[in-house]
Image: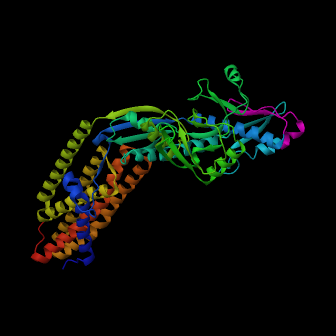
Amino acid sequence: MIRLPRWKVILVIAALVFGVLFAMPNVLPNSTLAALPGWLPHNRINLGLDLQGGSYLLYEVDTAALKNEKLTNLTEDVRNTLQQKQIAATQPVLQNGVVDVRITDPGQIDTAIKAFQDLGDALPTGGRDVMVTTAPDQHVHLALSDQAMQQQAFKAVDQNIEIIRRRVDAMGTKEASITRQGTDRIVIEAPGESDPEKLRSVVGQTAKLTFQMVDDSVTPDDIAAGRIPPGSIKLPSDSDPGGLVVKKRSVVTGEMLVNASAGFDQRTGQPDIEFRFNGQGTRRFGEVSSQNVGKRFAIVLDNRVISAPVIEGPITTGSGQISGNFTTEAAAQMALLLRSGALPAPMKVVEQNTVGAELGADAIQRGEISLGIGAVSIFVFIILAYGLFGIFAACALLLNAVLMAATLSLTQATLTLPGIAGMVLTLAVAIDANVLIYERMRDESRAGRSVVASVDHGYSLAYPSIMDANLTSLISAVIMMEIGSGAVKGFAWTLMIGVISSVFTAILVTQVLIGWWFRATRPKKLPI
């Protein structure tokens, strides 16, 4: 008798139940799906941009701006170090990617170099990211190492992707695909989002919030004449047409925010943004406000002063509000950006496209037709070639397709047109396993073995070849998943799911069906 352990039967039945339950939402109308109990699966397969239509954005991260920001901060660190160590020197100057400073007292050169070497951050490979070198006439040069900038740029792209994902999710576009392209580019595909400008306004804005002290020593005449002292910078201002001069060093940054929400000013009734700092921000803001009562501090967003109130007393609550010329919608959008965090590096749009829904509908229709033609062709071939056992293989193939749909629904993976191609390829290749098994059965039957022996030997002898072939396909899919992007990942994902489900259905499901058939009919001859 054909060996049919109970665990195999239970596993096949469990797979059938899983497949039907999780694939079912894809064929039910919306009204029926909404009426189902909450404990039943409701997730459908997410359709990609090429199937559903939507917006496509390709951004390039401005690594040059990131480097310039790092060098500007380094210049301020050098200036503060000179003041703290009381080293006699000229004002540090940033030019051609190098911070240059001249130590006027020759006896303090070694002290200055030692102090400068402690600036910057430690590198994983050892050393620090700031290189300090000496130059003629008591000059000292500080620059960022190439290795440090490469690491910073790579990290900035990863951080940008994570922040963009939080922003897009907050918009309600959960199926968006956000991936790295090359070293410094980010691809955003948002299925169902028909307005790329709206997506761009949320995704592309840096939303870097800082709190900086206003430099009240600079008069309007100084601003007009361009007399800006070292350590300060002139920024455009919503309230001051001529701009406002603020200290370069930020008192508190947006990274210390724990929450931001749109609200209304209780005094004016105008929309504003209410925020709250974390512990570090609360402590730092409390210290600065206590030391600067009666002075102004600037609230700066993306290098523009949106408000510059006077500190009337110590602010120790860790919360406040940003008032400006906000509309209700603008305040809500800005609060969203602040909650999700600032982009560590600015980006510029390289490509922007809108894919129409009608193109997606046409792609779905063509994909369904190709999938149907491929499935019918395979069914006809396998049934004509192997008769009853071919019907068993066709049933296994149907369950294979159901399991792929169920897995895509469960994992909420995005199905693209290349993904449909992967499903068609999987169904075509899946039948190869049954062909190997059935041909081995025929060979065993011709050699004079019984039905039971032919079936058992057919599975046991074909099993190594099946596993070898599918293992190589799985390895290829994993490699494509790791190094590919966009369409390649969609193809690789469906191929991975298909390989695993194909092996399961081709071997286990057909074995259970043949076992049930044998127990019911007790045949004397193999019907293939």
Report x, y in % for residue 264: 47, 41
Query: In which quarter of the view is residue 461 placed?
Result: bottom left
Residue occupying the far top of the picture: 225
Report x, y in % for residue 336: 46, 44
Residue at point 46%, 32% (across, down) = 349
Residue occupying the far bottom of the picture: 1
Q: Is residue 296 left or right of residue 20?
A: right
Q: Is residue 183 left or right of residue 418?
A: right
How are the colours assigned in the image?
rainbow
The quadrant of the image that shows the C terminus is: bottom left
Report x, y in % for residue 425: 27, 50
Residue at point 23%, 44% (across, down) = 367
320 and 191: which is toward the camera: 320
91 and 504: which is toward the camera: 91
Report x, y in % for residue 130: 70, 42
Confirm whether the magenta stretch covers residue 207: no
In this rendering, the answer to whether 305 lies above or below 447 is above
Residue occupying the far front of the picture: 267
* Number of marks present in the image shown: 0
Residue at point 20%, 77% (across, down) = 2
Query: In which quarter of the view is residue 173 placed?
Result: top left
**Residue numbers of the magenta segment:** 87-111
Query: In which quarter of the view is residue 136 placed?
Result: top right
247 and 421: which is toward the camera: 247
> Looking at the image, can residue 288 be seen?
yes
The quadrant of the image that shows the N terminus is: bottom left
Confirm whether the magenta stretch covers residue 92: yes
157 and 190: which is toward the camera: 190
In this rendering, the answer to whether 128 lies above or below 217 is below
